Image: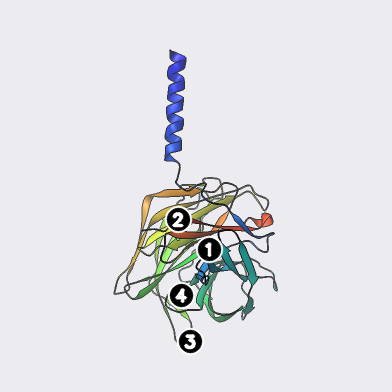
Amino acid sequence: MLRRTTWLSAAATLLAVLCAAPAGAADGPWQKVGDDTLSGVSGLAYEGRTEDGSGVHALVVHDNKRSGRPRLSRITHREESEDVSPLAWVGAEPVDLEAIEAVPGMPGEYVALASTGIVYRLRVSGDTATVVYYAPLPGIGEGDDFESFALVSQNGRLAALWADRGAGAARPATVYAAPLTFAPWGQPQFGSVTRRPYRAPYPTEDGTRHVSDLSVTGSGRIIVSSAADAGDDGPFDSAVSDAGRVTVSAAGTVRVTLTASARLLATFPQYKVEAVECLPGADGTLLGTDDENLGGYVRTQSFCGA
């Protein structure tokens, strides 16, 4: 009787764990878009749908540091295939690009972010990206290392979100937010900056990057990726979570509310997710990985619905 009771207790515990597992953890395949450290996906920006509507075009930034190596590519993602083509970069050459975002209401205009906090206002035409302006983010903290950037358009106003990635238990991420406008000559101009600490629910290894990227849904939900790695050959681990909400008032006031316990949406063992992009007009989410020596992968999942 004692053995049977113990077995039933263990089975109940296992069932509870399985039922609590995040939805979508095993949905759909990863598709390879790069073979080495030069071609990993550090950030994604939605560019538009394919003509037949079966896929999406997106810009991808690479975190290369040496001069002459690729900084920006375009991928065309379909259910069964990937097309990748490099873009020419004209202007000041960045070091370690980690994020890119389309500017709402300005076709062909983007903002890219380097890990040190330098933002690059870009104009993309065909296969060329031209630097319009570059400048540091406001309010950079000591030791900040940035991997994420998102733009939010609400009530006719624009705001920016970005985050220091954090590092394990000793250093949570810091999510920054500020109103954003652009000067006629292209300079990003940030308003008053707010800060919120954030800890990822998963992974929990030493050195975990609590925010490896973030994106915002049409209703203002903040979708965050988190990642951990043990070196250029892995092993890697990552997850996507619902972290809270952002609102921008008609007066331009930005309010960020992070949940006390972020809701885990999916986990991705063996992959290092560094890019998450909510696709407009749907609940689809485009994910990208920078798996160092193992290259880069992309996939879509449904995280960004209302």
Which mark, residue 185? 3
Circle 1 or circle 3, nearest the eye? 3
On-image quarter of the C terminus: bottom left
Residue 255 appears in the rendering: no
Contact (CB < 8 A) between labels 2 and 1? no
Marks 1 and 3, how far apart at CA: 25 Å
> Going 59% across and 67% down the picture, which residue do you hit?
75
Mark 1: amino acid: Phe
Q: Nearer the viewer, residue 209 or 126?
A: 126
Q: Residue furthest top?
A: 1
Marks 4 and 1, how far apart at CA: 19 Å
Characterize the local packing of mark 3: few (<14), some (14-19) or many (20 or more) Cα atoms within 10 angstroms. Answer: few
Marks 2 and 1, how far apart at CA: 25 Å
Mark 2: amino acid: Ser
Circle 4 or circle 3, nearest the eye? 4
Lateral position of residue 227 relative to residue 280, left or right:
right
- N-term-proximal mark, 2 vs 3: 3
- N-term-proximal mark, 4 vs 1: 4
Marks 4 and 3, how far apart at CA: 15 Å
- Report x, y in % for residue 157: 35, 75
Residue at label 2? 302
Residue at label 1? 146
- N-term-proximal mark, 1 vs 3: 1
> Going 51% across and 45% down the picture, which residue do you hit?
204
Which mark, residue 272? none
Mark 3: amino acid: Trp
